[in-house]
Amino acid sequence: MRRYAFPLALLFSLTFTAIALSAAPLLPPSQIDLTLPGTNTPNRAQQIEIDFATNTPPGPTATATSSPTATATFTATFTASPTATATFTPTMTPSPTPTPVGPFSYPEGVNSLTGLPYPNDEAMNRRNLLVKISNFPPEVRPQSGMNQADVVWEYEVEGGVTRFAAIFRSNTPDHVGPVRSGRLMDLELVPMYEALFAYSGASEPVQQMFMRAPWAFQILSPSVGDNCEEAGFCRFPRGDLAFEHTLYLDTAQAWARAERRQVNQPFRARGFAFSDILPEGGVPANDMFIDWYGRISARWQYDPATAHYLRFTDGIPHMDAADGQQLWADNIVVLEVEHRERPDLFESESRSASQEIDLWDQGRAYVFRDGVYYSGFWRRPCDLQLEATPTPVVGAAQDRCYSNPGTALQLVFGNNAPIMLKPGRTYVQVVRFLGDAVISEELADMSATGTAIYLSATPTATEGPSATPGS
């Protein structure tokens, strides 16, 4: 065995100096400023009641927990025997660095929406596809194709009514919908994910904003002439459902349409970070409930048997008509975002003003995975050097965020360390106030009565498709 000729005093000095230099200072929870001065987070009493410091981990560091242990072990073994150098040597050997899975770089062949490998070359070589899907009135449920989306956003469109923006990449369902109209928030989501944008139509002011956007050629919609035969937008009439809720999309045809238009480039959005390892500091949470002012409610319950969160809407299981399964996700993200009413942008089917949701800058967030949750922040950075896009929102504030395409939303702890999602499907729930999400370790009793009510209301099989275009 090779022996080292260093004097003991010098060796001790070098050891303690190396340990001191490797220990990165941590930000104590008491010093984390949760008021976010200068951001767009509303100042509400119910926000102040939430104590983030108790469940916001300081973020992962390699030295914070290992330094004291390494010092104690080295001192004891070195003084006991000269062979302690054999113990010291391997501790200084660097361990392999794992390949990062987000938030800024992803291994080759890994989907940045899920943190999982693409299932095939076709998925890897096509563009993200964002489809607007109705969630109101209740007669539109069960929707089709939701359980094949990689990421689903749910947000308020007007009057407490929510709508889904489902992003597809891994799978190619042939019956997604009912497809509905676009909204102001889509002006943020489409460039964030560099996505193709499939929707039925929009109010005239919003439609003009879409058509002036730099990504206007990424639009797939009957409002721009896309029909059943060429783009996959087909009507499936049903006697008990209004005409506007009968439009469905074949995603394979939509991607083929984009390919012919030469806008099917396989871009990846950057923002989410993934790890199979559960971060430290999670608080047990098996049940999370959101009520949008009595119009729509959403409940997510953790199922240990499948390690999934299962969705209930308005008190009954929310199903997917395509696969007959309850809607499920691996991660649930709740974002507190400022909402601004836009009475100048009434939708034809609504008596309430449209909502402008300011999805830029930063705000507070919850992240649920594996039966626990974490408190942190969401962040969508702006590029100050980037010129404003030619899509002004008339009447809106001028301090809008203009980010480079593909710069999607990030989730971070108070010390800016990324919050790691579980690889898989993620639902993002957008609320006005974080206190709107009621969290419990105990599962609410979703009785068999609710299931019976759902089954009794399940519509009969749809009729054959109609090629009639429309919105």
Image (cartoon, rainbow, N blue to C red):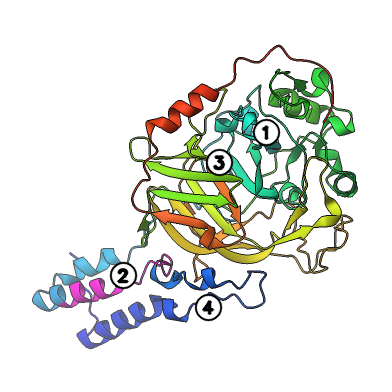
Give the quadrant of the C terminus.
Answer: top right
Q: Kindly identify the amino acid type of the residue bearing the numbered disc 2.
A: Thr
- Residue 179 position by quadrant: top right
Among the two numbered marks 2 and 4 on one chain, the one whose residue lies closer to the N terminus = 4
Q: What crowding class fits label 2: few (fewer than 14 Cα within 10 Å), some (14-19), or many (20 or more)?
A: few
Q: Is residue 185 above or below residue 395?
A: above
- The residue where tag 1 is placed is 125
Residue found at the far left of this picture: 80
Q: In x, y percent, where is residue 63?
A: 36, 70
Q: In x, y percent, where is residue 51?
A: 44, 71
Q: CA distance from mark 3 to mark 4?
A: 35 Å
- The residue where tag 2 is placed is 65
Q: In x, y percent, where is residue 361?
A: 67, 66
Q: CA distance from mark 2 to mark 1?
A: 42 Å
Q: Are marks 3 and 1 in contact (CB under 8 Å)?
A: no
Q: Which mark is residue 110?
A: 3
Relative side of 89 to 216, left or right: left
